[in-house]
Structures are given as C-alpha cells and as structure tokens.
Amino acid sequence: MAYTTIKYEVSENILTLTLNRPDKLNAFTGEMMMEMIDAFDRADADDEIRAIIVTGEGRAFCAGADLSAGAKTFDYEARTDRPDKQGNPVQADGSIDWSHEAVRDGGGRLTLRIFESLKPVIAAVNGPAVGIGVTMQLAMDIRLASDTAKFGFVFARRGIVPEACSSWFLPRIVGISKALEWTYSGRVFPASEALAGGLVSAIYKPEDLLPAARAMAREIADNTASVSVALTRQMMWRISAMDHPMEAHKIDSRAIYARGRTQDAKEGVVSFLEKRPAVYPDKVSKNMPSFFPWWPKREYK
C-alpha cells in the first residue's frame, strides 16, 4: 500500500512511522487513520521489525483532528468524506443504533490497533500534540518528547469529550486526578508538565529526540527475544486491568512454561554463560505459544 499521509521507513530492524502532513501540522484525517492501521498490520507481519517509532514531520507531532470541515468536523452524519463510513446509524423511527459501525470513533479504531501491536511502540513527540495527537500516544509504550512539544486534551473546549479510548488509557498512565485535571480544563501544557505528570518519560533537545528514540529501540532490537517482548507487551497492558493477581499468575505461569521449553530460553542462558550476544531463533509470526491469545476478541456492540 502506498501511503499519502504517513511515511513508513524500516532501517536496521526499526520501523519509523512519520505522520506526514506538515503543511497541516500533521492534522489527523480518516485517511491517516486507515494508513496507520495498515502500517501496524504490516509491522506485526514482518519479523524483521523489532520496534516501532512514531513521530511527526516538520514542527508538529499532530495538531489534532483536521478541522477544515468546520462545524461539521465531529458531526459524522453530515460528513461525506469519512472513508470508514458504513451506512447510517439513524433508524427509521429516529432512534440511533449505537452499535452501528458508523458510530465508531476513528481515533479509537487506531488506538485499539496499537493496543493489539506485537511490537513495542515508542512515541517521539517532536512538537505540538493535541486532541487525537496526544490520545493516539496513550496506547504506545514509551513517550519521549522534545522540549518544544506541547500537549492538550482540548476536547471540552471543542464541545466534545475525550476519544480514542483515552478514558481507559490516560488514568492508567498518569492517575485519575491528573487525567481529570487535564481533560476538564482542556488547556495546552508544556513538555515539562507532561514529564512531571508522568505522561512522558524524558525530554530532549529537538536534535536529540529521534537519536534517543532510536537508541531505546536499538536496545530492544539488539538484546531481547522478539516473542518474549510480544508476550510481555500484551501481558503488561491486559493484566493491569484484571481484578486479582491470580489472573496474572495464570498467564505468567503459562508464559514461563511455554517459553522455558523453547530454543530462545536455552540461547538466553547459554549466551549469558558464554558471555556473547544472544541470537534468538523464534519468530513472532510462527512461535507464539498455543495459549496466545488468552482473551476473547472484543466486538463493537
């Protein structure tokens, strides 16, 4: 698939996805949503990709939803340019079928796809990131920011509400009090406040941001077993929402048992004892354990 709103670049086992509408500050569109989802599908299917970096072209990460449609921007029924639109959820009696595909939020479709990723995802936030520009990051694993970056959960100031599953992600990352403060006020805040609030892990000068993100991705790609990382990612995200540590014990036990029988585990120990770099043979495409996935697929109903 040829992309028009993003760039897809793989180098030395690291995929860099760049939001690429710099003249519009990388504002989010339905086309960008579909291209990003396709890019994550491609990345999961490619065993050569060990980590993903997401960044923005030009001076912004993503300025939020493209507002060029004016007052119709968030009125799905009034829009004719939504590539994902599938019929009309308004029924003959005027009631709304809330489970209809056309009701679904595009940002949520993207974050749900990132949530499912089998590769670790690093956000390199190079500039302003507001609205979907910040909520899409919440399903990513590590967020690094330039000192020129700004963040804003501006939804209440646009007459809407937080989207992209951010009501699930944001409190888990920064705590409920900070999440409510930022979403109630809708104000735009600097990278320093994002760091203090736990939204980002570190701040860098603009020229140092991507090298830092690549160094972090390189650490993963060069030293870890890809199947172990894929399992760890899903374990951390999914088990954190379970109601008892016994649920974690079940998955931990199955994963340790399954992984302990593999050549990866043997190589990890032997390479350590022999004081040499490990070469892990297992592939995400072929060697995930038989109990994976352990969760039922969730439908939009």
Image: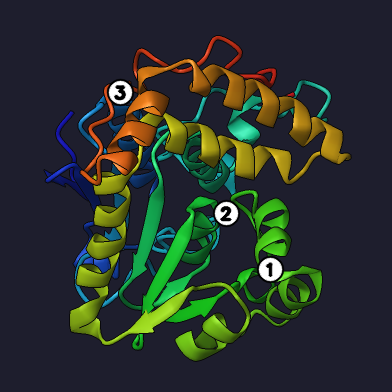
Mark 1 is on which residue type?
A: Gly
Q: Which residue is mark 1?
A: 159
Secondary structure at badge 3 equals: helix
Q: Is residue 45 above or below residue 198?
A: above
Residue 103 in sight from this viewpoint: yes
Secondary structure at badge 1 equals: loop
Kindly indicate the quadrant of the structure image that contains residue 284: top left
Where residue 251 appears, as percent x and y from the top left, is 69, 27
| Disc nearer the start of the sequence (3/2) | 3
Query: Would residue 101 be found to the left or right of residue 54 on screen?
Result: right
Q: Which residue is mark 3?
A: 45
Mark 2 is on which residue type?
A: Phe
Q: Residue at x 71, y 52 (%)?
A: 168
**Separation (CA) of disc 2 from disc 1:** 10 Å
- Binning the other alpha carbons within 10 Å of mark 3 as few (below 14), some (14 to 19) or many (20 upward) gives few
- Binning the other alpha carbons within 10 Å of mark 1 as few (below 14), some (14 to 19) or many (20 upward) gives few
Where residue 155 appears, as percent x and y from the top left, is 63, 68
| Disc nearer the start of the sequence (1/3) | 3
**Separation (CA) of disc 1 from disc 3:** 39 Å
**Separation (CA) of disc 3 from disc 2:** 33 Å
Q: Is residue 208 above or below residue 158?
A: below
Query: In front: 166, or 172?
Result: 172
Kindly indicate the quadrant of the structure image that contains residue 46: top left
Query: Would residue 259 be found to the left or right of residue 92 on screen?
Result: left
Residue 64 in sight from this viewpoint: no
Secondary structure at badge 2 equals: loop
Q: Which mark is residue 74?
A: 2
